[in-house]
Image: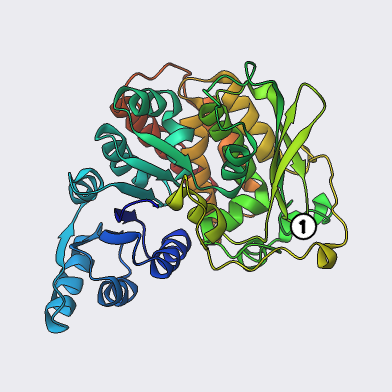
Amino acid sequence: MTANRKITILGSTGSIGESTLDVVNRHPDRFQVFALTANKNVTKMLSQCQRFQPRYAVMLNSESAEQLSKAIQAANINTEVLSGIESLEKVASHPEVDAVMAAIVGAAGIRPTFAAARTGKLVLLANKETLVMAGRIFMDLVKQHNATLLPIDSEHNAIYQSLPHHFNGNLTTVGVSRILLTASGGPFRCSPVTALEKVTPEQACAHPNWDMGQKISVDSATMMNKGLEVIEAHWLFDAAPEKIQVVIHPQSVIHSMVAYVDGSVIAQLGNPDMRTPIAHAMGYPDRIDSGVSALDMFKIAHLDFEEPDFKKFPCLRLAYQALAAGGNMPAVLNAANEIAVESFLTKRIPFTAIPTMIEYTMHSVKAEEMATLEDVLRTDAIARDIAHDWLTSLQ
């Protein structure tokens, strides 16, 4: 059995963070919460601090940190409250920390995730942007500092579980022919293209299978989520873009598959609950209880598969284009998408304008290589400015 692991949870008040704490709660003999972090949800963070008594609680927002500090003092909780990005980096790289759950949504999660890798931690990666925006730089850092990287995304975790135990980073030498990345197809899989213009944020966030935050729910509805996962899979498994195939699988029971040269296809199945991949990564190499009910094959009865419609879901096409272009283009894609989704959620643009904004931004930024995290963050800022300018031109 693995010794008691001290864990920092980056983004503890989000859906992944809460699921992680649920797994921690089931295994008090295995895990100890060292630090919890959030942006500005003081109420939820206070409740988590009362329950798990972390040494540190970090709020990215300074006003929220002040509020939390007062509330923690009043509740007589022995937790030190910190604020700002540097504090996120501190708790991700602290010498006493064994594992870091990187679950901050968006570009804000990159710096603390880098800090964890730089200090050789076990990095449980749920933050997509780290690999999408800075894949090569991050993977080099992981190798250089002997960090251990385990994917939390249900699809990448499924691929990891479907690869041989001795997988060394070379798909060819272990006989892999393709990675089959499954996608639910989101809430608009069966909707005609003409109906997408009138889609509301509420409709886009109503995912048929998964309970997720707003940003990732919209990404699932546009299929950008799957596009970002294609880019992640490229870096995680050193897979060429043409070896990563997206397969629509509406039931979300098969979380991904690996096809081998001998004709075998190995898949990981399970109920759609993020506690399964979280428990797999947290307990690795042991298997531990996740709290997820067993899969009932008789209730499922059948499994469906379809090819994705690139015309209906242009975001998926744009992600493949960004990966093929390489360099800074995936970072541009990601930044423009964040602005586009935020603009849609605040009803400033229609659903169908999300890919339009992204494509405009990709065409407006000069393609170039990136060597450092500073290059990545600069590209991110430039792309956001261009996306904002495009938005302003509409008003």
- Of residue 41 and residue 255, the one placed in the foreground of this image is 255
Residue 69 is left or right of residue 39, and the answer is left
Where is residue 119? Give x, y as percent.
24, 35
Label 1 element class: loop
The x, y position of residue 235, in whole percent, is 51, 27
Most distant residue in the front direction: 1
- Residue 342 versus residue 76 in the image, above or below: above
Relative image position of residue 136 (x, y in whole percent): 43, 23
- Asked which colour scheme the image uses, the reply is rainbow
- Indicate the quadrant where residue 389 lies: top left
The correct choice, above or below, for 284 with respect to 233 in the image is below
Counting every numbered tag in the picture gives 1
Percent of width and height locating residue 122: 35, 41
At 42% from the left edge and 45% from the top edge, which residue is drawn?
A: 124
Q: Residues within 10 Å of mark 1 (few under 14, many from 20)?
A: some
Q: Amino acid at mark 1?
A: Gln
The image quarter containing residue 245 is top right
Q: Is residue 10 above or below residue 247?
A: below
Look at the image and tell me whether residue 320 can be seen: yes
- Observer-nearest of 325 and 59: 59
**Residue at left 62%, top 21%?**
171
Residue designated by label 1: 251
- Going by the image, does 55 lie left or right of 383? left
Q: Looking at the image, which residue is at 78% across and 54% down?
A: 250
Whether residue 360 is visible here, answered yes or no, is no
Name the one closer to the observer, 55 or 350: 55
**Which quadrant would residue 164 be assigned to in this image?**
top right
